[in-house]
Every structure is written in structure tokens, then in C-alpha cells.
Image (spheres, rainbow, N blue to C red):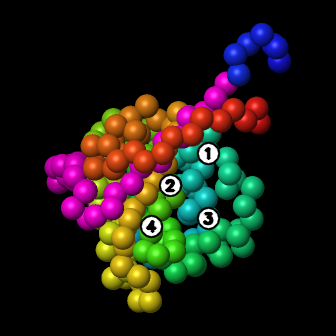
């Protein structure tokens, strides 16, 4: 490593909505685009790993790659964990993963599109739809409290349009961190 080179950093932005009225939905794609969003109701470690790896390959998602099948299954079977998949003419285009946390908080744990589907106006629609599902999550999970806050984080390694998409959907910045980039 060049000791005179500037240290590489990663900036992480944390955004939130504190009311369902904060959501500013994107326009839905026209019916001719063949886009539909479906909840993956049967926990499938293989399918979830496929989505994670396919969406995250170009943007350095690596945290879950070493997870064994059993860890994927345990995570996916937790109450309040949902995966919503966008399809274009029957082909998976992207996904949004919701994770219920304490006190009515829901995290958008993962969200993104496969590279071939970027730039087709699917991302804004998927984020809008998934955020609405975060707000009504308790309706599908008896025993969970009503959602009081939806949050997400994005970083400087993510796609170039991620932050703007979150802000257009009504998410507000509440924290920023800057850390050294991992050399891994």
C-alpha cells in the first residue's frame, strides 16, 4: 500500500420516515412494461441468496455471502421479515427486504435491482411499494406492533441513484458516518 495515498473512506447515510404520510410514491410503470411486485411468502434460502448476490455483485455486498443455508433459513423465518420481488415479464428484476425491529421500527435491510434492470423506472416503484409494505407490516404479522418508523441506510459504494431515490420517496437524512474502507 502506498503510504502517501489518501485513505479511502466510505460514507454511510441513514434515512427515515416517521409517518406513512412521509411516503411520496413514484409513478407505476405502464402495464405494457410487465412489472409486478410479489411477496416471496415461502422462505427460500437459495432464492434470497440469489437475489442478494445478483443485486449486490456490482456494489460490494459481501456480508451475507458466507452465510450457510441454515442461517438464511433462520433469518427468513423470523416474524416480520419479508422479501418483495419485482418481476419484469416474469424475470426477477430486484427486491426489497423488510426486517421488523423493536418498538414498531422496520428496517429496509436490502433494496436494489439487478444491473440489467436499472434505468427502467422499476427502482422507484419497488421502493415505493416496499416502503408502503413496511408501513402496513403489522397487518400481516399478528403480534407485531404497528409501524412507527421506517429506516434505511445507503453508502457511497451503492448505486449512484440510491440516495436521490430515497429522498424522492420522502426519506429524510438523520445521520451520516464516514469510516475507512475495508481493504477486503
Q: Which residue is mark 1?
A: 61
Q: Which residue is mark 4?
A: 106
Helix, strand or loop at mark 1:
loop
Disc 1 or 4, which lies upstream in sequence? Answer: 1
Characterize the local packing of mark 4: few (<14), some (14-19) or many (20 or more) Cα atoms within 10 angstroms.
Answer: many
Q: Label 2 near label 1: C-beta < 8 Å?
A: yes
Indicate whether 66 appears above or below 146: above
Q: Residue at x 39, y 54 (%)?
A: 16
Residue 79, horizontal then vertical, whole percent:
52, 80
C-alpha gap between disc 2 and disc 3: 16 Å
Disc 3 or 1, which lies upstream in sequence? Answer: 3
Helix, strand or loop at mark 3:
helix
C-alpha gap between disc 4 and disc 2: 12 Å
Q: Which residue is mark 2?
A: 110
Disc 3 or 4, which lies upstream in sequence? Answer: 3
Q: Nearer the viewer, mark 3 or mark 1?
A: 1
Q: Residue at x 77, y 10 (%)?
A: 4
Q: Label 2 near label 4: C-beta < 8 Å?
A: no
Q: Residue at x 34, y 37 (%)?
A: 164
Amino acid at each position: 500500500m502506498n503510504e502517501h495515498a489518501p485513505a479511502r473512506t466510505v460514507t454511510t447515510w441513514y434515512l427515515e420516515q416517521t409517518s406513512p404520510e412521509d411516503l411520496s410514491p413514484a409513478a407505476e410503470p405502464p402495464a405494457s412494461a410487465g412489472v409486478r411486485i410479489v411477496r416471496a411468502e415461502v422462505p427460500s434460502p437459495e432464492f434470497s441468496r440469489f437475489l442478494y448476490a445478483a443485486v449486490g455483485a456490482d456494489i460490494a455486498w459481501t456480508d451475507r455471502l458466507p452465510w450457510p443455508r441454515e442461517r438464511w433459513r433462520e433469518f427468513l423465518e423470523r416474524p416480520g421479515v419479508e422479501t418483495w420481488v419485482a418481476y419484469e415479464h416474469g424475470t426477477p428484476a430486484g427486491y426489497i427486504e423488510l426486517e421488523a425491529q423493536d418498538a414498531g421500527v422496520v428496517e429496509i435491510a436490502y433494496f436494489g435491482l439487478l444491473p440489467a434492470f436499472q434505468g427502467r423506472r422499476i427502482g422507484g416503484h419497488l421502493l415505493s411499494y416496499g416502503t408502503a409494505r413496511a408501513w402496513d407490516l403489522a397487518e400481516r404479522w399478528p403480534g407485531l406492533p404497528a409501524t412507527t418508523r421506517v429506516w434505511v441506510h445507503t453508502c457511497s459504494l451503492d448505486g449512484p441513484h440510491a440516495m436521490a431515490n430515497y429522498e424522492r420517496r420522502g426519506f429524510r437524512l438523520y445521520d451520516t458516518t464516514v469510516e475507512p474502507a475495508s481493504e477486503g
